[in-house]
Amino acid sequence: MPGDPVPHLPPLLEAVLGVGSELELRTTLQRIVDGAAELTGARYAALSTADPGKGGPAEIRTTTPAPQDADGLDVPILVGGEPFGRLRLIGRSGGGPFTGEEEQLLRVLAAQAGAAIGNARLYEAARQRERWIEGAAAVTTALLSGESAADALMTVAERARLLADACAGVILQPTPEGGMEIVTASTHDDPGDLVGTNIEPGSPVLEQLLGGEPVFIDDSATDPRMTTRVRHRFGPSMMLPLQADGQLIGTLALPRRRGARPYTDVEHRLATQFASQAALALVLAGARHRRERLAVYEDRDRIARDLHDLVVQRLFATGMMLQAAQRRARVGVVQDMLGKAVDELESTVQEVRTAIFALQQPPAEAPTTLRGRVLRETAGVAAVLGFQPSTRFLGAVDSRVPDRVAGQLLTTLRRALDTAARRRGVSRIEVTVDATATLTDGRAAVRLTVYDDGDLGPGEDAQGTTATWRAPL
């Protein structure tokens, strides 16, 4: 109406309501810019933030380009009494400079925008906190479900990378030389040569990492504390201790690409809390895994004792009885039959003892002794054959055979087993490792014998073949 002291009050109310109707930060900023342009009739409006790391995008603007040689209008936006950014308008649609009334309207809108931005910040922080909490819970669930150690570390690295919007999630662990090494890496693409990268002893950042302190980097490529060969790829980064119960498992590093938005203080806190919970979950998962292995080991030990105390002793006693009967028998045929029975019992006793040894091996680990490695090879071919090869050990195999000779023996064993498995009609394979053998010149040696009862091939009448290999000790 004529004489209305505040003719722009309804558009101002509409602009204020529009600014406060959103909780997502970027959308709120865009509404502020659009509302300011519409309220004042400006041809161009832009909102630049004082600190993009804390306030989100560096600049939000209208779609129209800024007019040249036109008057501008600039007002600050405060959030919680602190500078957030500046709202700038250029060029009135009707021409001429902006009026004092329009400047006043813009300042009222800027004040309301500060409150709206504060609410959007709180909402975004709550959403961030919720995502990190959900992520930590998911990691804990995954780790306690029985993953292997390597899978557990990858789970932590990958989940943290996604939560932090980082280009990589890596885990470093201390090395015997006093440095740290990347042992796990999760990236958008192939991690390439990240795994195996070392932070050498003497690095300025190493003392903090080994001491369990978080390290926050603004630009990995230029920070003098960073000395790795891959630092030039990354910009802002967080390096967080994976530490629980006084135990330092390693460091979780979350680098972003060069030029990417820096991490905020809120992200620092949330990521640090995530790393602490992930470390605790890793420790609990490791303890659970050790308990399960111990239970399996104890059960295997009980089975091995039962086999030794009952089965082996009974077989041995039966063999002694047959040997006594053999000595008393007068008929040659009976003697031969008893002799074969004694031989079979001795072979059975040897196989049961081999089974006892296999049961006493730590579960879920690659065997380190020669006996264990031989048994692993025969167990592997059993899946192809459909039956378990017979395996015998003579002498102190583990202590007498050096590593170099053991490697050659295992290579020969694999070839012999592969050849035997390819023969037609094979139903029995016997493997013997004899550490009491000698060479023709009298030197101590180890002998590998692999027998199978398969067909030799076309034109051959006999069945069965024996492969023999020797090496000096």
Image (cartoon, helix red, strand yellow):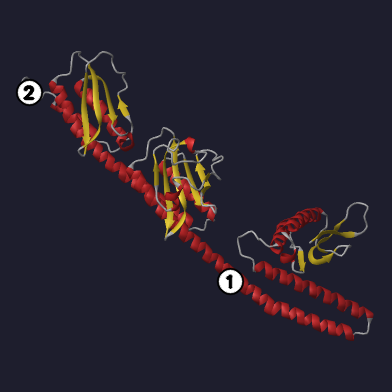
Disc 2/disc 1 C-alpha distance (Å)? 91 Å
Q: Is residue 414 above or below residue 92?
A: below
The crowd level at tag 2 (other Cα within 10 Å; few <14, some 14-19, many 20+) is few
Q: Which mark is residue 55?
A: none
Q: Residue at x 41, y 32 (%)?
A: 259
Residue type, label 2? Asp
* Residue 124 x/y as whole percent: 31, 41
Q: Residue at x 18, y 13 (%)?
A: 96
* Residue 182 x/y as whole percent: 52, 47
Give the label, 2 or 1, closer to the camera: 1
Q: Is residue 189 left or right of residue 75?
A: right
Q: Residue furthest left?
A: 3
Q: Is residue 20 above or below residue 284?
A: above
* Residue 455 x/y as whole percent: 86, 56
Q: Is residue 116 left or right of residue 143?
A: left
Residue type, label 1? Glu
| Element assignment for label 1 | helix
Badge 2 or badge 1: first in the primary sequence: 2
Tell me whether the residue at label 2 lies in contact with that at label 1, contact meaning CB atoms closer than 8 angstroms. Answer: no
Q: Nearer the viewer, residue 225 or 434?
A: 225
Q: Residue at x 49, y 63 (%)?
A: 287
Q: Residue furthest bottom?
A: 328
Quarter placement of the C terminus: bottom right
Q: Nearer the viewer, residue 228 or 43?
A: 228
Q: Which mark is residue 298?
A: 1
| Element assignment for label 2 | loop
* Residue 351 x/y as whole percent: 75, 70
Q: Is residue 91 left or right of residue 230?
A: left
Quadrant hosting residue 223: top left
Q: In the rendered image, which residue does mark 2 sit on?
A: 4
